[in-house]
Amino acid sequence: MADRRLQVFHTVARLLSFTKAAESLHMTQPAVTFQIRQLEEFFNTRLFDRTHNKISLTEAGEKVFAYSERIIGLYNEMDNEVRRLTGDVIGLLVIGASTTIAEYVLPGILGEFQSRFSDVKLRLSVSNSVGVVQMVENNEVDVGIVESPVTNKNLAIRVCWQDQLKLVCHPKHEFAGRKRVKVADLEGQTFISREEGSGTRAFIEAYLKDGGLSSSDMRHIMEFGSPESIKSAVEAGLGISIISSATLSKELKLGTLAAVELDPPLERPFSLVHQRQKFRLRAMEEFLEFALEHCDAQEE
């Protein structure tokens, strides 16, 4: 029985979706279906029930899924222990990151990690913070890096460093010449925000609420899914926003945006997240150690 068939089956059974499994495995959906059909022919029984565009495991499928978890886990453990003896660090490492981190923080870190461990194949999945945490929970990624607090106590969480957020506005805006802006000063301003589900948005809304402002106190005219889109809207004079200082170096250098300190200051954690019970491949262990080195450097 081909090992690949069992891996494909395990992914489909875990996600209960041929489409999601194909995306996770970077395969076409027909290729996934073919692998499942081959496995069903091997056992001479159906492993999935397919009804109304939904799938569920049959009794035989439940048995195969339980054993596949053990088999794949033991295989990974065996591979990891042999690699530990030989000193090899190879394999696929899937990292999930929220948008700001993926665009502005990770490129340098991943580049340095790849130069040190050239035999590790890296794959990056980008989503908002809620989406990344869900990917970690569903075993779709090995490690997640998010820009908001994580409340799931079943996950291992390590706060790496604190990211400072600043108010940004057009250089001719009334706030541009100030050193600091209080929360109360934002009342009545036209505000450009991130999309629902964004860790940045949730964090900013909590900050404004603590400062006595509600959404109705400002005019929310636009929502965008990335810091780049928000910066473009602010550069066009469409409103103000609050974004990570890590995203602003180019615009501040060119003078196309003005950044102002908030009073009180606003900081949020960048956190590494992974499953506590997940068997950690050597590549995952090395990445966690490597990333934590960068965390410590950021804190110094």
Image: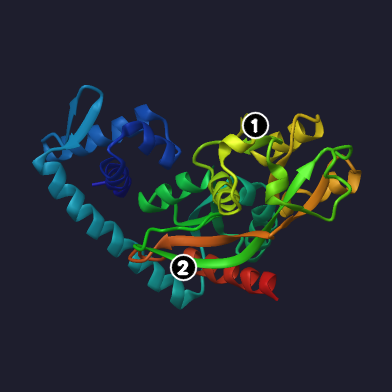
Residue sitting at 18 percent across and 55 percent down? 67
Which amino acid, by three-letter code, is at mark 1? Answer: Arg
The numbered mark, 1 or 2, whose residue comes first in the sequence reads 1
Left or right for 70, reference 76: left
Residue sitting at 54 percent across and 61 percent down? 271
Compared to 123, does 155 lie above or below?
A: below
* Cα distance between the residues tagged 1 and 2: 50 Å
Compared to 246, does 77 lie above or below?
A: below
Residue 199 appears at what percent x and percent y? 54, 48
Front in this rendered view, residue 113 or 225: 225
Left or right for 297, reference 144: right
Most distant residue in the top direction: 52
Reading the image, the residue beneath label 1 is 219
Front in this rendered view, residue 185 or 254: 185
Front in this rendered view, residue 221 or 38: 221
Is the image coloured rainbow, by chain, by secondary structure, or in one colour? rainbow
Residue 83 appears at what percent x and percent y? 45, 70
**For the residue labelled by badge 2, is the local secondary structure a helix, a strand or a loop?**
helix
Q: Is residue 28 visible?
A: yes
Nearer the camera: disc 1 or disc 2:
1
Residue sitting at 31 percent across and 41 percent down? 15
Residue 109 appears at what percent x and percent y? 66, 60
Residue sitting at 80 percent across and 30 percent down? 237
Reading the image, the residue beneath label 2 is 282
Which amino acid, by three-letter code, is at mark 2? Answer: Arg
Residue 204 appears at what percent x and percent y? 59, 48
